[in-house]
């Protein structure tokens, strides 16, 4: 099983989701990407790395990359952090691709959230991690 986590810039939400999920499901191949290319090659945002590290997640080996059409062939499941990311992903879907694309919060139904808020803007890194951990547990249970 190969799972790709996608957000806007690939420096906060999706690398955090990848880091959390790879700890929960070591047998699953994970990656993360952004729909935009502004941060390609950069490590996750410092404050997100700090918040994740305090919870035991090491994101330091991750580097931002941009989502592309080939990801539909490379992954069995693509997880978007919000509806805008999902729409951007779907716009790139190849004609015959059947790879499922889901919102991450679909796996945290009790959260009351329909997206993972971007802590780059909200500055709530711990709140984002709380939701990411809940969704990661739900995703793990669904596999």
Image (cartoon, grey):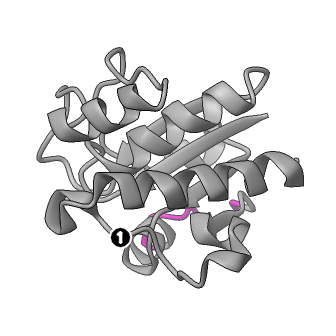
Q: Nearer the viewer, residue 30 or 134?
A: 134
- Is 92 covered by the magenta stretch? yes
Q: Nearer the viewer, residue 127 or 20?
A: 127
**Where residue 20 sits: x, y (%)?**
56, 36
Q: Is residue 89 above or below residue 14?
A: below
Q: Nearer the viewer, residue 32 or 45?
A: 45
* Residue receiving disc 1: 117
**Where residue 28 sits: x, y (%)?**
74, 28
Residue at the spot 51% in from the left edge and 62% down from the top edge: 80
Report crowding for label 1: few under 14, some 14 to 19, many 20 or more residues within 10 A (C-alpha): some
Q: Nearer the viewer, residue 54 or 67?
A: 54
The span shown in magenta is 91-97
**Where residue 107 sits: x, y (%)?**
71, 65
Q: Main secondary structure of the magenta part?
A: loop
Whether residue 31 appears in this view of the structure is yes
Residue at the spot 79% in from the left edge and 34% down from the top edge: 1
Residue at the spot 35% in from the left edge and 70% down from the top edge: 117
**Where residue 62 sits: x, y (%)?**
35, 23
């Amino acid at each position: 099983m190969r799972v790709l986590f996608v957000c806007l810039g690939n420096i906060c939400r999706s690398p955090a989701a990848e880091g959390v999920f790879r700890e929960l499901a070591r047998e699953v191949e994970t990656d993360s990407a952004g729909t935009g290319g502004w941060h390609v090659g950069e490590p996750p945002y410092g404050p997100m790395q700090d918040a994740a590290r305090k919870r035991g997640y090491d994101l330091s080996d991750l580097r931002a990359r941009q989502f592309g059409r080939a990801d539909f062939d490379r992954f069995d499941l693509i997880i978007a952090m919000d509806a805008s990311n999902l729409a951007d992903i779907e716009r790139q879907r190849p004609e015959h691709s059947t790879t499922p694309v889901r919102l991450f919060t679909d796996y945290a139904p009790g959260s009351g959230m329909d997206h993972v808020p971007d802590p780059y803007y909200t500055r709530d890194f711990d709140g984002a991690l709380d939701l990411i951990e809940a969704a990661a547990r739900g995703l793990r249970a669904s596999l």
